[in-house]
Amino acid sequence: MENNNYCVIMGGGIGSRFWPFSRVSKPKQFLDFFGTGRSLLQQTFDRFSKIIPVENIFIVTNELYTDLIREQLPELNSNQILLEPQRRNTAPCIAFASYHIRAVNPDANIVVAPSDHLILRENEFLLAVKTGLDFVENNNTLLTLGIKPNRPETAYGYIQADNNDNVIFKKVKTFTEKPNVELARVFYESGEFYWNSGIFLWNVNQIIDAFHLYLPEVASIFDAGKNIFNTPDEKAFINENFSASPNISIDYGIMEKAPNVHVLCTDVGWSDLGTWGALYDISEKDENNNATLKSNAMYYGSSNNIVTLSNSEKLAVIQDLDGYIVAESNNVLLICKKEDEQRIRQYVIDAQINYGDEYV
């Protein structure tokens, strides 16, 4: 039944790799990177609301972002916004949402997705999600969406699937964190590996059972309040107990351990938009492979750059740069080699140490 289908959108991250656009006060999921008039969070909501009843969509986020959620998604009532008092990674986030939804509907089938992904082929994606929800309703399994790779990418995790072309739901053999380029090339050429999208589907009882088996230290915290969820006392219980949860991902805590994990392999034009480089890859470019987002720029002897300014009326003049990120937002200008973008998190830490919270 469609009314048994639910969606959990995880929207509490800081997105520090997109600094200086993404700030603690307004992370990347609340930003409109493409000038569409809708933030990444709003686009994610719009996507899922086409197949999930709006009243069955929940946002899990840090309590810092309560007002931003309400401003950007006025369709939601307060019961659909689940507020974490501290950041504790994806496993406690998903446990919180699962216990809450089970109190609402003990037969719920749930798709869990980050708030900041880009999906270019939306119809194919939504069909895959509907197919996956039907599968988890009728099978004792934990399901993840795998993305068919189109290059040996080192920025994504990989899922190795049982190489059986006669089934669409393949048994998972292994999960591998971000590989080096040599291993990524082996994965890509083997045909057995898919990018780990971080999008999961399961029946609410199957995932809570998995917490009991593989993360009992998390399950015990939420079990203590199992009769409190979806009541007026839930917030006080979460505020008092959530911080006791370990900081652990759902991949490491459950998906890599459980034997009943399947992957639905898809090709839906997916990007997790985790970095400036990922944004550059999917952006329109000029004849010299420069990408200019929501701003104006003139290039002289420059190529392979991504440039974006906080005000579309500003003009950037770029001379003799090759392969750079030039991003200006409010009181910060970042000029950084694309190949060194993994250092941006350190830049954020250094800015906070040297200048305080004003620049982060």
Image (cartoon, rainbow, N blue to C red):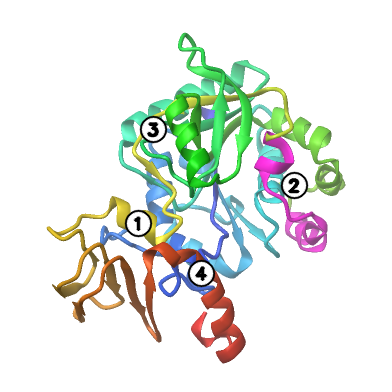
Which residue is located at x 32 percent, y 69 percent?
Answer: 324
Location of residue 307 by image quarter = bottom left
Q: Nearer the viewer, mark 4 or mark 3?
A: 4
Main SS class of the magenta portion in the image = helix
Q: Secondary structure at mark 1?
A: helix
Amino acid type at image mark 1 = Leu
* Label 4 Cα crowd, 10 Å radius (few <14 / some 14-19 / many 20+): few
In the rendered image of this protein, does residue 30 appear above or below residue 315? above
Q: Disc 2, disc 3: CB below 8 Å?
A: no
Query: Residue 109: x and y, percent?
Result: 59, 29
> For mark 1, what is the residue?
279
> For mark 3, what is the residue?
125
Q: Mark 2 or mark 3, which has the lower sequence index?
A: 3
> For mark 4, what is the residue?
343
Q: Nearer the viewer, mark 1 or mark 2?
A: 1
Inter-mark Cα distance, 4 to 1: 17 Å
Which residue is located at x 44 percent, y 63 percent?
Answer: 28
Q: Secondary structure at mark 3?
A: helix
Query: Residue 308: x and y, percent?
Result: 28, 71
> Residue 24 vs residue 189: left or right?
right
Q: Nearer the viewer, mark 4 or mark 2?
A: 4
Amino acid type at image mark 3 = Phe
Inter-mark Cα distance, 4 to 2: 41 Å
> Residue 240 vs residue 111: left or right?
right
The residues colored magenta run 232-255
Image disc number at residue 250? none
* Label 1 Cα crowd, 10 Å radius (few <14 / some 14-19 / many 20+): many
> For mark 2, what is the residue?
229
Residue sitting at the far front: 182
Inter-mark Cα distance, 1 to 3: 20 Å
Amino acid type at image mark 4 = Arg
